[in-house]
Image: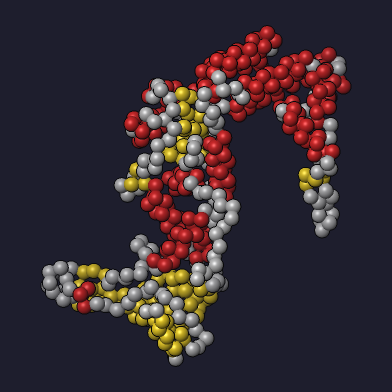
């Protein structure tokens, strides 16, 4: 082959005057003597680069000082970087050395081989780069790189262990920085019969701790992991109505204030009060023979649970003929536009039922209470709601009054600590997506490491340019 040699600014450039390109292989010591093209079982083309591997003289010196003999030299095959959609591998004799004096044996060192796998360091790094992006599944990475799914999983697990664990993967690293506010919640594992709990830094959104179970022991183990000195910098923790988490923090770190946000209070109110009251009213109307009024309550659950501002927004969208589902002439489907009359139907329901009107009043008072920034004023507002619930005598509203009473301190603490469980609920949704995307993860350790890594992925709206710098 002919090469054109140019030298400028101290840099040597070799230009091959054929249809081939010269690319750095980083396969130090390997000399390619022949390349054949074969077909893999998957049907993909495989470039088999046959050659030899240099054996330096210093590598043949045994620890006892004698020169080692080549015992055997069997051919070895190592997977290398893909070339476009085609696979490639290296085939060369791999020497086994033996000392005639002490009998010690060893294998010839391969500088470009990845530890633990019959692949090159370049292919290993390429797989790690694809996995670190976070948008590819293990199956997709296996398809791109030509590796097996189990190999990809082992590479990814080792990559995550190097980032988030110490002592050979037996212990999680401590948090990168001090957190002022924590969030704690449980999520379902596998078929839903088992749970795990995760604790996050509410400011950064990073998952700091994951453990099987949803009892106090999870919190105790987290505190032991980070230490009391680190916990002394934590001011408040956002959690749901799980009393175990609240009690665990109060027992170990009495200065930390549990905070119950607006989302969980309203969710309990909608699921346990509004929904049940609607069912009770519908049954009562049917027993009284008022079939038309009972029929009017059917399919009103969403309307009764919505804020008035949400219903007004939907009516406004209907007036503007907003399309909520775009049709397709190809599949003969038509555009679906927003329906109207949400607020009017809501007002009609309130006029016809005093108990539903009371529920609407409580919703408005809850929303106003959570907008306050003074604990005394918020305590008065929540007490007023509790009095309204008690005055109705309804069993569902009495249950809600007890809920507010049992969590009173954590509810009014929201006026001082303006935090919510929004980020941790967002993490829960990402966990569901991660599990669904990967078709489940039977290895809990690997799954938990994936969750920790996923929580640290930052969304980038504008990707950086790949233009070559001058």
Q: Residue at x 35, y 61 (%)?
A: 116
Residue under the point 39% across and 66% down: 121
Q: In which quarter of the image is residue 98?
A: bottom left
Q: Where, quadrant-wise, is the N terminus in this rendering? A: bottom left
Q: In the visual, does 327 lie left or right of 420?
A: right
Q: Percent from the top left, x then y, of residue 447?
A: 47, 46
Does residue 253 sit above or below 195 in this rendering? above
* Residue 35 visible at all: yes
- Residue appearing at x 37%, y 29% in the figure: 232
Residue lying farthest to the front in this orientation: 9
Looking at the image, residue 318 lies above or below residue 128? above
On the image, the x and y values in percent for residue 421 come to 55, 32
Camera-side residue: 411 or 294?
411
Q: Which residue is drawn at 13% across and 74% down?
A: 66
The answer to whether residue 407 shows anywhere in this view is no
User: x, y (%) of residue 151?
Assistant: 44, 59
Q: How many labels does the image show?
A: 0
Q: In terms of depth relative to the viewer, which is nearer, 73 or 3?
A: 3
Indicate left or right for 402 with 308 as reference. left
Give x and y (percent) for residue 49.
43, 79
What is the basis of the colouring in this image? Answer: secondary structure
Most foreground residue, 388 or 140: 388
Query: In the displayed structure, does residue 138 sit left or right of residue 340?
Result: left
The answer to which image quadrant residue 302 occupies is: top right
């Amino acid at each position: 082959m002919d090469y054109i040699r140019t030298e400028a600014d101290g840099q040597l450039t070799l230009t091959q005057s054929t249809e081939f390109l010269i690319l750095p292989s980083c396969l130090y010591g390997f000399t390619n003597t022949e390349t054949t093209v074969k077909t893999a079982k998957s049907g993909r083309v495989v470039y088999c680069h046959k050659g030899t591997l240099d054996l330096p003289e210093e590598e043949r010196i045994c620890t006892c000082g004698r020169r080692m003999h080549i015992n055997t030299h069997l051919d070895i095959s190592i997977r290398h970087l893909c070339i476009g959609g085609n696979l490639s591998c290296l085939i060369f004799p791999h020497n086994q050395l033996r000392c005639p004096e002490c009998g010690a044996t060893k294998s010839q060192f391969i500088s470009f081989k990845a530890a633990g796998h019959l692949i090159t360091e370049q292919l290993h790094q390429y797989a790690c780069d694809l996995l670190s992006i976070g948008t590819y599944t293990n199956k997709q990475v296996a398809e791109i790189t030509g590796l097996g799914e189990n190999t990809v999983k082992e590479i990814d697990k080792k990559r995550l262990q190097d980032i988030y664990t110490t002592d050979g993967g037996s212990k999680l690293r401590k948090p990168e920085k001090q957190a002022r506010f924590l969030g704690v919640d449980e999520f379902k594992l596998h078929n839903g019969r088992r749970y795990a709990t995760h604790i996050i830094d509410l400011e950064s959104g990073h998952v700091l701790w994951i453990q099987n179970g949803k009892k106090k022991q999870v919190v105790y183990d987290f505190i032991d992991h980070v230490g009391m000195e680190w916990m002394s910098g934590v001011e408040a923790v956002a959690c749901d109505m799980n009393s175990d988490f609240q009690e665990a923090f109060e027992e170990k770190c009495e200065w930390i204030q549990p905070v119950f946000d607006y989302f969980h209070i309203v969710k309990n109110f909608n699921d346990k009060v509004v929904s049940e009251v609607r069912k009770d009213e519908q049954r009562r109307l049917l027993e009284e023979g008022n079939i038309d009024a009972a029929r009017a309550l059917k399919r009103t659950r969403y309307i009764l649970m919505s804020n008035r501002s949400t219903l007004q927004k939907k009516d406004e969208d209907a007036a503007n003929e907003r399309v909520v589902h775009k049709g397709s002439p190809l599949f003969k489907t038509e555009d679906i536009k927003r329906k109207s009359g949400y607020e009017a139907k809501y007002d009609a329901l309130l006029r016809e039922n005093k108990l539903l009107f009371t529920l609407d009043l409580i919703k408005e008072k809850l929303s106003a209470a959570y907008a306050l920034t003074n604990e005394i004023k918020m305590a008065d507002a929540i007490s007023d709601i509790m009095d309204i619930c008690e005055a109705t005598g309804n069993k569902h509203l009495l249950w809600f009054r007890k809920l507010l009473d049992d969590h009173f301190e954590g509810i009014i603490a929201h006026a001082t600590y303006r935090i919510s469980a929004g980020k941790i609920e967002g993490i829960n949704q990402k966990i569901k997506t991660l599990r669904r995307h990967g078709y489940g993860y039977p290895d809990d350790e690997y799954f938990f490491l994936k969750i920790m890594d996923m929580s640290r992925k930052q969304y980038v709206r504008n990707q950086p340019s790949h233009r070559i710098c001058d």
